[in-house]
Image: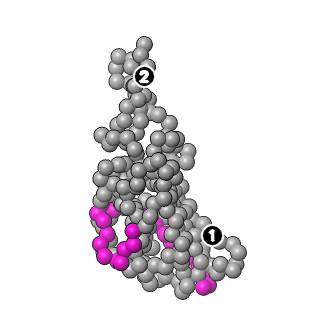
């Protein structure tokens, strides 16, 4: 019997069991072959009544998996905010965007092909698919010594990560236009992976 072939399909790896049929077993998604990138934004100040504050746009050549988004923050006085992740099928426009650098976790990987942008002013948001996740974050003066965290963690137990297919496929952080607290600023850490094998 020949060695099983490893195949790529729809952004996942499979082993062809070569049983005379079409039986395939998915390879465990522990990411040794995927290019990984991390981005950290420190002290980001949104607009007064923020809508989308950050957009992760996919890639025209790779499948992008969002692994984690971790948000912390401070404000002049203790407050709490709701942060949602929303899926959009078109990119935002306007809003004074800043494109962020994605740092490779392995210097042998190619440069990231996905794009992460923050918006200093409210953009014209893209077409809404739906709200994916959300949570409440308590923010307080840094001197309080206790900083709350809002984690969106995906595929830690082999569950399916949010996947972006194409440059117009986006996951955004959205604050729903609620009033932003005085002195408020956010620290945001993002980890994502991109498939390095051929997309079919």
The secondary structure type at the circle numbered 1 is: loop
Q: Position of residue 3 (x, y in %)?
A: 43, 19
Q: Which mark is residue 44?
A: none
* Residue 83 shows in the view: yes
Q: Position of residue 58 (x, y in %)?
A: 35, 56
What is the crowding at mark 1: few (fewer than 14 residues within 10 Å), some, or many (at least 20)?
A: some
Task: Tell me the residue at 50%/76% (across/down).
Answer: 44
Task: Tell me the residue at 57%/74% (across/down).
Answer: 73
Task: Tell me the residue at 54%/81% (across/down).
Answer: 184
Can you tell which quarter of the image residue 18 is in? top left
Q: Which mark is residue 148?
A: 1
* Residue that carries the numbered disc 2 in the rendered image: 4
The quarter of the image holding the C terminus is: top left
Q: In this orientation, which residue lies closer to the viewer: 49 or 32?
A: 32
Can you tell which quarter of the image residue 174 is in? bottom left
What is the crowding at mark 2: few (fewer than 14 residues within 10 Å), some, or many (at least 20)?
A: few
């Amino acid at each position: 019997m020949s060695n099983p072939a490893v195949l790529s399909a729809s952004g996942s790896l499979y082993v062809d069991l070569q049983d005379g049929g079409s039986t395939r077993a998915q390879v465990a998604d522990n990411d040794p072959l995927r290019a990984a990138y991390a981005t950290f934004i420190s002290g980001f100040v949104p607009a007064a009544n923020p809508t989308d504050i950050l957009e992760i746009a996919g890639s025209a050549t790779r499948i992008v998996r969002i692994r984690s988004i971790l948000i912390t923050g401070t404000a002049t006085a203790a407050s709490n905010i709701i942060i949602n992740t929303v899926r959009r099928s078109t990119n935002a426009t306007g809003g004074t965007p800043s494109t962020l650098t994605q740092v490779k976790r392995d210097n042998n990987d190619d440069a990231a092909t996905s794009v992460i942008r923050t918006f200093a002013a409210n953009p014209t948001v893209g077409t809404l698919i739906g709200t994916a996740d959300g949570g409440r974050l308590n923010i307080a003066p840094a001197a309080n010594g206790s900083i709350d965290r809002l984690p969106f963690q995906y595929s830690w137990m082999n569950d399916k990560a949010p996947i972006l297919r194409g440059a117009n496929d986006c996951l955004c952080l959205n604050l729903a236009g609620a009033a932003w607290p005085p002195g408020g600023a956010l620290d945001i850490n993002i980890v994502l992976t991109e498939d390095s094998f051929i997309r079919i």
